[in-house]
Amino acid sequence: MNKLTIYIDDKQFQAEPGKSILEVCREHDIEILTMCHLKGVNDVGACRLCLVEIEGMSKLLSACTTKITANMVIHTKTERIKKYQRITTELFFAERNHVCAVCVANGTCELQDLGYKVGMDHIRYPFLFPKCEVDTSHPWYVMDQNRCIMCTRCVRVCNEVEGAHNWDVKNRGYQVRIISDFDTPWGESITCTSCGKCLQACPTGALWPKAIVQGQMKKNPEIIDELMERRKMIL
C-alpha cells in the first residue's frame, strides 16, 4: 500500500491511508491531549481536547476523528490550540464536583494529569455544583456521577468489547448523565456482567470498586486494546 506524505509541526512523515491524525501522531511520539480516546474502541471526538489546525481550513478539527490526506499540513501546538485546551479543561472541572483530595483516583486520574499539563492553577468559570447521584446499588462497584466527564469510554467498552450494552447516555447539556440499563440502578441491571472493564476504561474516579478508599484506585486501560488484539488472533 502506498503511503501518504503529511507534515506535522513542520516535519515530514509517511503514513498509511485511512489512519487518523491522532494515530499517526502517537506512532511518532507527538503528544496530543485526549480524554475520550481509548485504544481498542472507536473514537467519537467527545472531549474536543485533541484539536489540531490544518492549513487551508479555518476551524479546528479533532485529531481522533479526522483522517489524513495527501500533503496535509497539520499543527498541533499553536497558541490557539493551547487556549481552547485550557478552556475545555477548566470546564471539565467546573461542570461537576471534582474534589481530588478525597477521590479514589487521586494520583492516577487522567483529568488531574490534564490539569497539570495545561498549567491550570485556577478556574475562570463559575462552578455549577450540580446535584449528582452516587449509585452504590451494585454489590462490588460504585458509579459516582460527580466525577464523570462524559467521555463515554465506559459506554463504548461495554458495547464494543464486552457486548453487554449496559451503559448509555441520557439527556443533553448540563443535565447529561451516564445511565445503566435504561436508567435503572446499576445493581438491578439485567445486562451488566460485572466484568469491570468500564472501571479500567474510566479516566477519572467516576467508576470504582467498593473495596478501595481515597487514592487507592489502580487502572490499566491498556488491557482493553490487548483484549481486542487477542480476539483478532483467535478469529
Image: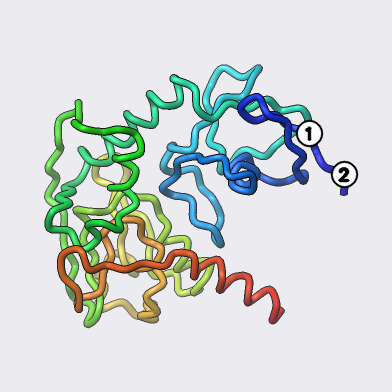
- The residue lying toward the viewer, choosing from 145 and 182, is 145
**Is residue 126 shown left or right of residue 68?**
left
Q: Can you identify the residue that label 1 sits on?
A: 5
Dot 2 amino acid type: Asn
Give percent across and percent down for residue 202: 36, 60
**Residue that appears at 73% across and 46% down:** 18
Q: Quadrant of residue 49?
A: top left
The residue identified by callout 2 is 2
- CA gap between label 2 and label 1 equals 10 Å
Residue 191: name its quadrant: bottom left
The percent coordinates of residue 219 (x first, y second) are 36, 67
Label 1 packing within 10 angstroms: few (<14), some (14-19), many (20+)? some
Residue 179 x/y as whole percent: 30, 61
Mark 2 is surrounded, within 10 Å at the Cα level, by few (under 14), some (14 to 19) or many (20 or more) other residues, namely: few
**Picture layout, residue 226 above or below residue 43:** below
Question: Residue at horizontal 35%, vertical 80%?
Answer: 194
* Viewer-nearest residue: 39 or 131: 39
The residue lying at 56 percent from left, 70 percent from top is 226
Rendering coords of residue 1 (x, y %): 87, 49
Q: Secondary structure at mark 2?
A: loop
